[in-house]
Image (tube, rainbow, N blue to C red):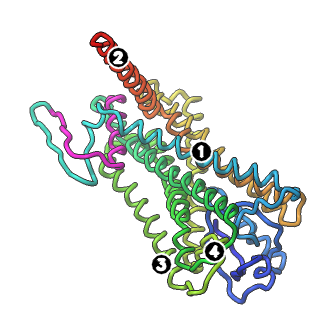
Amino acid sequence: MLKYRRHRRSFGDSSTGASEGSSRIHFVFKFGHSALSAGAWPEVDELVNLVMASVQMTWNVTGLFSNRPFNLTNWSFGSSTDPLFAHRLAGEVLYFAFGAFGTAANVMVLVAVSRLNKFKKDVVLLIGKHCLREDTHTARRNYCGHVTPVTTILQINRFHLREAGFRRHPTSQSSLYARVAYLGFTVASLLVSLGYVTSSVRRTIIELTGDFPMTSLQCFVQGIHIFFFETGVLTSCFDLVLMTIDRAIILHLSRWSHKFSTPIAVKVVSLLQAITFVDFCVVFALALIHRDTTTYSANCFYEDTVGSVHYEVHFFLTMIASIAIVFIYAVIVISMWVRKRSGRLGNSNLRRRDLIVTKRIGILVVPIILLHLVPFSIYSLIGPTGPYYNIISIYIFIFGCFDSTVNAFIYAWFHPDVKKLICKFRHWRLRQVQVSVCKTNTMLQCTTRTS
């Protein structure tokens, strides 16, 4: 999580290093952290405190960044006599459980799309073996090659086109952006869930094995969960904007819909993925350049020191994205209400279907953003000297973990196309189990008769 603080690494109690202060100001990316400890802000005037609190509340709109600097670098369960022991232990259990549930939910969505054989035939491979043959007489596309994760993008797209009647309703092609963004959002949410799980496992291992010295390279390698958080959360933010734009195009710019095709949608999502990956590589490169060769404590949760330019880029991207999402959905809802009152909404089945999907997504998107903003805003106002600071901080981050890990599953379930895929996958799996049971029973009967 992004923290703005004066930082100095120490081996034992990191609060000692924090109290001593440092002459350098670091913008620190720290992911997978856990419980908060009582720590004080650097001594600054009230105006700077107010500005920094406002900046960090804006960051937390996307659930990406934390609000207060911590003096402890690891989640310490503490002893059984610690009054916060029960809260920390329960928090760690919930933290791991929600991360594992989010991982399983996102994997189920991806597997449900990729394992249906009837949709594999309609996939155009973008990575791996390219094999696309089109029979001009039957207008059928034949698929050959192997399946990659990218193929699920076009599986969702082509399923939507068949269900919506693409040839009869060319304007439905614009919603390809939503199908592509759904898959990207699912993959991003899967990365975030893996980040929560790996960080929880790492904290537990350190608690069980105790502290031990390690080199800077080992600390760097153990920060793999940072990659999950960095790429996953930024991609989720971009994909949410893409879904919002898709809804606006479908409902208000239907004449432009035919200009958007599957290749354009895939290129846009691929560009977003590339931007987040390159950004992460830059962060790691800067961290390696400025890393010294001393030995660190195993409690170090990899801290990336970045410059002010990198900080400002992240800040404006997330701030603009969050404001744009809320603003666009507000405009969509108001305009739909005005059209409905004036009778200009239209009665076509496709229009009503798109309107229902937009309402469902809007009901999910705006509250999710607000639910991220309100708790972290309250958390910022309470401050480290407020009552129940540590307890509140534990459960606020658990809420963020749960929210980030189930987003993609909720989105997929509320969209009719993906919901049908999941239901058909479940029925297909049940049929496979029934067939295997029948085969087993038949073999047993044959064996019995033979004996």
Question: Which residue is found at the position 71% from the left and 77% from the top?
Answer: 5
7 lies above or below 51: below
Label 3 packing within 10 angstroms: few (<14), some (14-19), many (20+): some
For label 1, the residue is 365
Of the numbered discs 4 and 3, the one sitting upstream in the chain is 4
For label 2, the residue is 444
Please, what is the three-letter code of the amino acid marked with disc 2?
A: Leu
Please, what is the three-letter code of the amino acid marked with disc 4?
A: Val
Question: Which residue is found at the position 47% from the left and 75% from the top?
Answer: 282
Q: Residue furthest top?
A: 449
Which residue is at the front of the view, 337 or 349? 349
Return the x and y of residue 422 as percentages of the image width and height: 45, 31
Please, what is the three-letter code of the amino acid marked with disc 3?
A: Ala
Query: Disc 1 to disc 2, how far (Cα)?
Result: 53 Å
**Magenta region:** 139-166
Q: Residue furthest bottom?
A: 23
For label 4, the residue is 28
For label 3, the residue is 285
> In which quadrant of the rendered view does residue 423 lie?
top left
Name the secondary structure under disc 2. helix
The magenta stretch spans residue 273: no
Of the numbered discs 2 and 3, the one sitting upstream in the chain is 3
Name the secondary structure under disc 4. strand
Q: Say whether marks 4 and 3 touch (CB < 8 Å).
A: no
Return the x and y of residue 50 as percentages of the image width and height: 79, 70
